[in-house]
Every structure is written in C-alpha cells, then in structure tokens.
Amino acid sequence: MKQSKRTRQFFSLFMRHQNRIFAYILTLVPHGADAEDIMQETASVAWEKFGTFKEGTDFAAWLKKIAFHKVMDHRKRSGHLYPRAVRIGVSVGGQAMMLPLVTCTRQRNCLKTYS
C-alpha cells in the first residue's frame, strides 16, 4: 500500500520530535508506564488531528500542546496528585540559598503544619 505525502510527512515529523515530547511528558507524570500510555494517546490524537496542523508552523509545539492536554486528562481520570516543583529557602553554612523541593499538596500542608 502506498503512503500519501501527508502520511509520510506526519511520520517524519512525529519521529523527529517523539523523544522530546516523551521527555516532556515524563516531567509531568512520575511513572514511566503512565508516560508511555499518554505518549500513545498523544500520537493517536495527533494523527487524527493532523489535518488541522498548519504546514510551516512549529510541529513540536503543536504536539506538546496535545501531550499537555492528554496529561491533564490522565490526571483527571486517575485522580493522582503528582508532585509539583516548589522552591524553599534554606540556610547552608550560614548562607541563604533557594533549593528546589519536589512536593505534593499533602506534603506542602504537612510542612506548613510542622514548620
């Protein structure tokens, strides 16, 4: 079966950007299996909606937007509270520093209660 030009174009663009999009998804969900499922859903939606993609625009940004919405859908379905990065001020050796602290809502509430 012959592939159409548009089909080849989709697969070429998708293959070029899939690792970056998967890495992006992994920054939003902590479990690799969830990220793989979301990547599959992203690919499926991208293929279905490829007709709406405007040639000459940023395919990676378009794909990233789809991935973001798939992550949000996954969070709503699963009810997971995934970690969110926040920064906290600490004193190390008498020097004030801002350090990243990965925490979720319950952990932040715990820190407020016990600090």
Image (tube, grey):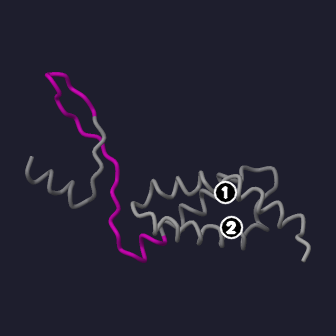
Q: Is residue 65 left or right of residue 54?
A: left
Across and down, in percent, residue 61 comes to 65, 52
- Residue designated by label 2: 46
For residue 85: magenta? Answer: yes
Quadrant hosting residue 22: bottom right
Residue depicted at x 59% and y 70%: 40
Disc 2/disc 1 C-alpha distance (Å): 9 Å
For the view shown, which residue lies furthest in the left direction?
114
Number of numbered labels in the structure image? 2
Circle 2 sits in a helix, a strand or a loop, which is it?
Answer: helix
Residue depicted at x 57% and y 66%: 39
Vertically, is 99 above or below 24?
Answer: above
Is 36 in front, or is 42? 36
Quadrant hosting residue 89: top left
For residue 79: magenta? Answer: yes
Q: Which mark is residue 62?
A: 1
Instruction: Kindly identify the amino acid type of the residue bearing the numbered disc 1.
Output: Trp
Residue depicted at x 78% and y 57%: 12
Across and down, in percent, residue 87 comes to 29, 41
For the view shown, which residue lies furthest in the front direction?
1
Quadrant hosting residue 83: bottom left
The quarter of the picture where the N terminus appears is bottom right
Is 31 in front, or is 91? 31
Q: Is residue 33 left or right of residue 93?
A: right
Across and down, in percent, residue 63 comes to 65, 59
Across and down, in percent, residue 109 comes to 18, 57
Q: Earlier in the sequence, mark 2 or mark 1?
A: 2
Q: Which residues are magenta?
A: 73-98
Q: Is residue 109 left or right of residue 70?
A: left
Vertically, is 104 above or below 2?
Answer: above
Instruction: Kindly identify the amino acid type of the residue bearing the numbered disc 2.
Output: Ala
